[in-house]
Image: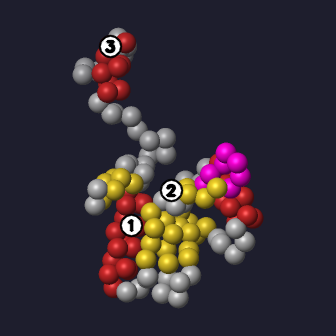
């Protein structure tokens, strides 16, 4: 496509179809093992968890668990990591803390006493 100042509607629609849209916060969707992650940082953390699991450092992990905070209000973490003693840790890989995330984190930690969200 040429670098003209104004595009026709058809040119703009074609541009959209090509998937040239950037993430609002600069995150790049990344796929590993057939799983698509919202950012490279999240995908890298997944790879780190796989290595920790293989080495016996952790008992297991879960991808993108969803928690119901209130009717119509959900929080989706990036991971739950289970250590060798069976203790769960909620992990969220963050490049940018939005107001929505900060509010949901507070509601989550108030509702699920004893569970804290760890940001990586």
Classify residue 22 by image quadrant. Answer: top left
Residues packed near mark 2 inside 10 Å, few (<14), some (14 to 19) or many (20 plus): some
Secondary element at tag 1: helix
> Which residue appears at 42% of the width and 60% of the height?
42
State the mark number for residue 10: 3
Q: In whole angstroms, how far apart are the C-alphas of marks 1 and 3?
A: 40 Å
Classify residue 76 by image quadrant. Answer: bottom right
Q: In whole angstroms, how far apart are the C-alphas of marks 3 and 2?
A: 35 Å
Residue extending furthest toward the left: 1
- Nearer to us of marks 3 and 2 is 3
If you read the primary sequence from the N terminus, does the residue marked by circle 1 or circle 3 appear first? 3
Which residue is more in the foreground, 95 or 5? 95
If you read the primary sequence from the N terminus, does the residue marked by circle 1 or circle 2 appear first? 1
> Which residue appears at 35% of the width and 19% of the height?
12
Q: Is residue 20 left or right of residue 59?
A: left
State the mark number for residue 46: 1
Secondary element at tag 2: loop
């Amino acid at each position: 496509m040429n670098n003209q100042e104004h595009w026709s509607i058809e040119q703009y629609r074609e541009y959209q179809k090509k998937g040239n849209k950037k993430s609002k916060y600069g995150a790049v969707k990344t796929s590993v093992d057939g799983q698509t992650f919202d950012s490279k940082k999240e995908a890298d953390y997944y790879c780190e968890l796989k290595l920790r699991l293989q080495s016996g450092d952790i008992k297991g992990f879960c991808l993108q668990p969803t928690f119901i905070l209130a009717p119509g209000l959900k929080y989706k973490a990036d991971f739950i990591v289970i250590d060798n003693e069976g203790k769960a840790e909620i992990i969220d890989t963050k490049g940018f803390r939005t107001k929505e995330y900060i509010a949901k984190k507070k509601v989550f930690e108030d509702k699920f006493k004893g569970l804290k969200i760890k940001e990586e």
